[in-house]
Image: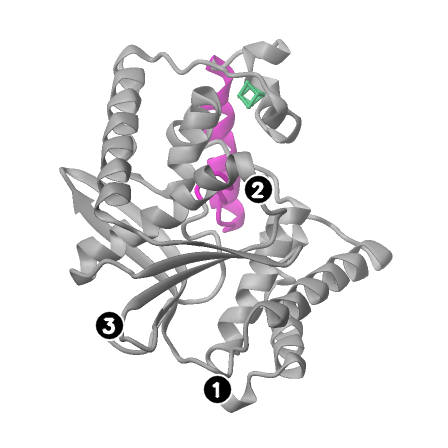
């Protein structure tokens, strides 16, 4: 019996499949929930703070206002599974907030949020390309001085080394493709704002990059279809295994993948009984709190 095909692809799902097909299966096909992590929760907090910041009038977007937005975001997220599930106490909770505080302050070293007006924040875009549904959340969309679209993505993890920079920007090109399909306009610029260092990485989408991305997404989708038809999702042991929450079901760690579906069903039944949402950390779409805000049509 073949596995059911996932209904859609997001940038994080594309990279999850490339990193390890078996981890993709656990996350996307079996829908095995992943426990909340400090790094993902910190990212959620910082994104929520910057989303709130851009809902303020431009002159009010100061560092102090951003830190007040962060405090608001933490209050709102504290009872949610992402934060509550970490069961942080005392110093650990203070350390999380202090780290998020540092990243929000670093953001101001990259740009002045009072100097431009976004046309949308936390935009959830969904388009159908060649029968495949592509989805992604754009952190921020604005028009530059020439009236061209600019896509911005905030990153709270470390910036990639030069060797991996191209691959990381591939995710942002994905957002460019979504804009092109939805709005009929290719963004002039896509940028990743890495808040740890802080450093901005910028790419200029072109016919070549868009065609290359379409071809890559098509090839990955064919590989997913093949893997589902043959039920053949292979493990790819490597450095990412250290952070993988599916080791208990992975043959590379002595586990049995057949146990994953049963565990996912049990988790879903437990979540339904307690009214909790089951998070899927490998997707990234819909994992953030807050609502998309489209200020104006591009
Ligand atoms: S432990 Fe490693 S090989 Fe196994 S599923 Fe996770 S990432 Fe893949």
Mark 1 vs mark 3, CA separation in Å:
19 Å
Q: Is residue 175 visible?
A: yes
Nearest to the observer: residue 43 or residue 62 = 62
- Counting residues from the start of the chain, the first of labels 2 and 3 encountered is 2
- Counting residues from the start of the chain, the first of labels 1 and 3 encountered is 1
Query: Which of the 4 image quarters holds residue 50?
Result: bottom right
Rendered image: mark on residue 298: 3
Is 194 on the left-hand or right-hand side of 149? Answer: right
**Mark 3, other Cα within 10 Å: few <14 / some 14–19 / many ≥20:** some
Q: Secondary structure at mark 1?
A: helix
Reply above or below: 245 against 194.
above
**Mark 1, other Cα within 10 Å: few <14 / some 14–19 / many ≥20:** some
Which residue: 63% across, 70% down? 109
Is 161 on the left-hand or right-hand side of 9? Answer: right
Question: Where does residue 252 sit, x and y in percent of width and height?
Answer: 58, 11
Q: Which residue is mark 1?
A: 58
For disc 1, does the CB lie below 8 Å from ligand 1?
no
Reply above or below: 42 against 61.
above
Q: Which residue is mark 2?
A: 160
Nearest to the observer: residue 292 or residue 67 = 67
Mark 1 vs mark 2, CA separation in Å:
31 Å
Q: Quadrant of ligand 1?
A: top right
Look at the image and give the residue range highlighted in magenta: 258-283
Q: Magenta segment: does it hold 245? A: no
């Amino acid at each position: 019996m073949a596995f059911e095909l996932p209904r859609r692809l997001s940038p994080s799902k594309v990279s999850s499949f490339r990193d390890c097909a078996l981890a993709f299966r656990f996350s996307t096909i079996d829908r095995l929930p992943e426990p909340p992590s400090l790094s993902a929760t910190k990212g959620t907090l910082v994104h929520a703070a910057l989303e709130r910041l851009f809902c303020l009038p431009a002159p009010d977007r100061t560092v102090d206002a951003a830190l007040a937005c962060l405090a608001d975001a933490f209050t709102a997220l504290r009872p949610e599974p992402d934060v509550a599930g970490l069961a942080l106490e005392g110093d650990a909770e203070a350390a999380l907030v202090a780290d998020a505080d540092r990243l929000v302050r670093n953001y101001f070293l990259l740009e002045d949020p009072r100097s431009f007006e976004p046309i949308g924040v936390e935009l959830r875009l969904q388009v159908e390309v060649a029968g495949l549904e592509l989805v992604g959340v754009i952190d921020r969309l604005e028009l530059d001085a020439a009236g061209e679209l600019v896509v911005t993505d905030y990153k709270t993890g470390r910036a990639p080394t030069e060797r991996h920079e191209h691959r990381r920007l591939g995710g942002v090109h994905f957002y460019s493709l979504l804009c092109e399909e939805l709005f009929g306009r290719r963004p002039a610029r896509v940028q990743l704002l890495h808040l740890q260092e802080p450093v901005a990485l910028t790419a200029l989408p072109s016919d070549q990059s868009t065609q290359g991305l379409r071809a890559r997404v098509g090839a990955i989708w064919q590989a997913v279809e093949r893997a589902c038809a043959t039920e053949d999702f292979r493990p790819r042991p490597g450095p990412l295994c250290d952070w993988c929450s599916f080791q208990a079901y992975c043959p590379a760690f002595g586990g049995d993948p057949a146990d994953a579906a049963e565990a996912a069903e049990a988790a879903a039944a437990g979540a339904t009984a307690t009214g909790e949402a089951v998070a899927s950390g490998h997707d990234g779409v819909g994992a953030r709190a807050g609502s998309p805000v489209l200020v104006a049509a591009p």
